[in-house]
Amino acid sequence: MRNDYRHEVKHRISFPDMLCIRSRLSAIAERDSHTIDGKYFIRSLYFDTPEDKALREKTDGVDRRQKFRIRFYNNDLSFIRLEKKSKLNGLGTKDMAALSVSRVKDILSGKLDWMPEDEEPLIRELYVNMRNDRLAPKTIVDYTREPFTYPAGNVRVTLDYDIRSGISATDFLNPGVPTVPVMDSPVILEVKWDGFLPDIIRRAVQLNVREGAYSKYAECRVFG
């Protein structure tokens, strides 16, 4: 499944800022229906090449780039997704395909022979990248997310915090894998929208901070 390209803006904010924005959004936007008490836990496993192509393209600000990851929510292994995030001139989109636990284990153990024949184009694309560019699992990223939605402009606002790095660990399915907090304990505000961003949302999240410069994957690679 592929989504259309959307506007994406990220802010690194303080905890007091998060409390203020959460209060504003709670008054005007809806909580995502998949949350538990307004939030959910996310674990992602990011892929990269031996030369760290995805990391370098992000830190260098390359206009056209992509990265692959595997992700689940709230420790629910019945719903695991392979995702490819693509950026083009500041706009973002995401391709997705479902993965079973057994297929994730195959990927982590290097058993890839099934992938070229899979019905999902994204899985076949990952295979090509793993074979040609030596793309491989690189690190685990854990965090908590509070998502809000607003129908006009198809807006989605998320507050991400408690970001933790698996350093070089790739034992994605192990709930006890050691992780460490990223430096400075940041809160990340992300705003996504289609054709326009309603003024009511713009006012609710407007802060005097730099936008678009944060990457959870890049921060979690600080350790290696």
Image (cartoon, rainbow, N blue to C red):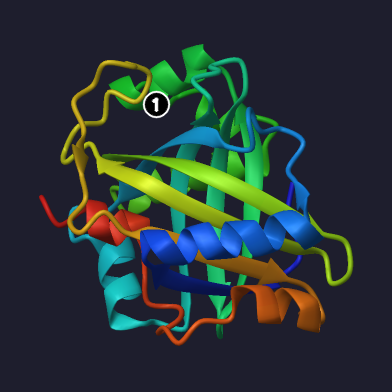
How many numbered tags mark residues here? 1
Q: Where is residue 155 in the image (x, y as percent from the top left)?
A: 76, 65
- Whether residue 123 sits left or right of residue 7 in the image: it is left
162 lies above or below 12: above
**Amino acid type at mark 1:** Ile
Q: Where is residue 164 in the image (x, y as percent from the top left)?
A: 27, 42
Is residue 50 something that shows in the picture?
yes
Q: Residue at x 62, y 68 (%)?
A: 191
Instruction: Name the residue furthest left.
Output: 224
- Whether residue 220 sits left or right of residue 25 in the image: it is left
- Whether residue 91 sits left or right of residue 197 in the image: it is left
Q: Which residue is drawn at 63% across and 28% down?
A: 36
Q: What element carries label 1?
A: helix
Q: Quadrant of residue 201?
A: bottom right
Q: Which of these two is toward me, 182 or 100?
A: 182
Q: Which residue corresponds to mark 1?
A: 107
Q: Which of these two is toward me, 151 or 76?
A: 151
